Amino acid sequence: MDADKPRKIVLAGGGTAGHVEPALAIARAWSAEHENDSLCFLGTPSGLENQLVPSAGFIVHNIPKVAMPRSVGTDFLRLPFLLWSAVREAEKVIKGADLVVGFGGYLSASAYIAAWLMRVPIVIHEANAKVGWANRLGSLFTKCIAIAHPVQSGRFSRANVTGLPLREDVKAAVRESSSNWEGARIQAKRELGWEEDKPLILILGGSLGSTFINSEVSQALPTLTSKGIQILHSVGAKNELPLSSKNYRAVPYIYDMAAAYLAADLIIARSGAVTCAEVGALGKSALFIPLPIGNGEQARNADFLVRANRAQVVDQKSFSSSWLLAHIDELLLASAQSPFSGLNDDLSSEVKIMALMERAIDGKCK
């Protein structure tokens, strides 16, 4: 291929921030090195990519969302027809592309099939500790596979372990804070308007929020704040915004996540792959309540943090406002006793994935 010829790359990563943010990190890094190349995103009409991708300066083309039915029924019988419709729409975007890069999620399955039918090279990145069904499907069509965590068996056991691309603000926070983690926490609290001598809990429910976590936190809130505990709570843009009060601040979405992470003494969150990677990189302690749907990937994402004594995982059936109140003191104590340091200072995930992309374009991953 002519090295000077502009290339078209389609990235399929939509639905939640867990799929969008790693894709955006790759898009930014690739564009910085290949200014003449054209990059665009596949998305779905209801996905978070419709806000995050355009704000990052990239175009998103929506195709129908095709969810995998969780039981045999009418939706299961309609699946082939819905999937084929989405594939045909994906083909329109992928036409003329030199590469498709998928990050999992429902829309990636349509992108993989469309790319294979059109003989367009494919690269897959799997962020979760347990591989999702769309990426398992995509692995039938390519050997160019990148994973954030080692996998013990199957096709993904032979994949390239690249880690998970972090957002630029988180990477910058790691670089700037690594020489003085404790000082960075104090400074972040000041900048966000919190009292530095009181513990701060950051509560996240994923990019779309969690009505379950929101409800349990609201019941525990009076007791927590009366103990002098400060709380920054991201409730999700589509959920009702509670009234803020002394020691409690509710927001629909946190855009400066790096500062919020740095300021927090404890994080309570879903264990999405991106959240776990960011918690580890910024040396935080966390309580994770895995999302109890999907293929169980969230239950495994925090394993490396648990092994490092940086996290505790509680399933949703066990978590409640009373559980939180009974354990909050020991959680904060464990956080205070945890060393101020990141678990991973390797910020080269984008470089490793882009090298794989070049190999795929050159036809070396068949």
Image (cartoon, helix red, strand yellow):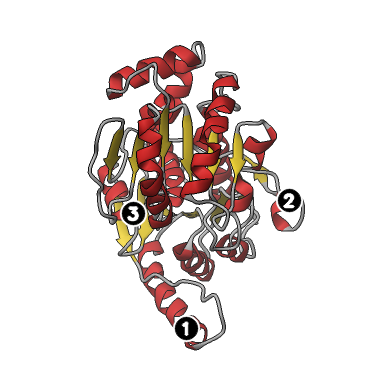
Q: Nearer the viewer, residue 300 or 56?
A: 300
Q: Amino acid at mark 3?
A: Leu
- Residue tagged 2: 157
* Mark 1: secondary structure: helix
Q: Residue 48 got which mark?
A: 3
Q: Nearer the viewer, residue 324 or 140?
A: 324
Q: Distance between the Cα atoms at labels 2 and 3?
A: 30 Å
Q: Nearer the viewer, residue 62 or 219?
A: 219
- Compared with 125, 233 (above or below) is above
Query: How many other residues sit within 10 Å of disc 1, few (<14), some (14-19) or many (≥20)?
Result: some
* Mark 2: secondary structure: helix
Q: Residue at x 31, y 37 (%)?
A: 255
Q: Distance between the Cα atoms at labels 3 and 1?
A: 24 Å
Instruction: Name which of mark 1 and mark 2 comes first in the sequence.
Output: 1
Q: Residue at x 40, y 24 (%)?
A: 263
Task: Name the front one of labels 2 and 3.
Answer: 3
Q: Amino acid at mark 1?
A: Asp
Q: Residue at x 36, y 60 (%)?
A: 43
- Residue tagged 1: 75
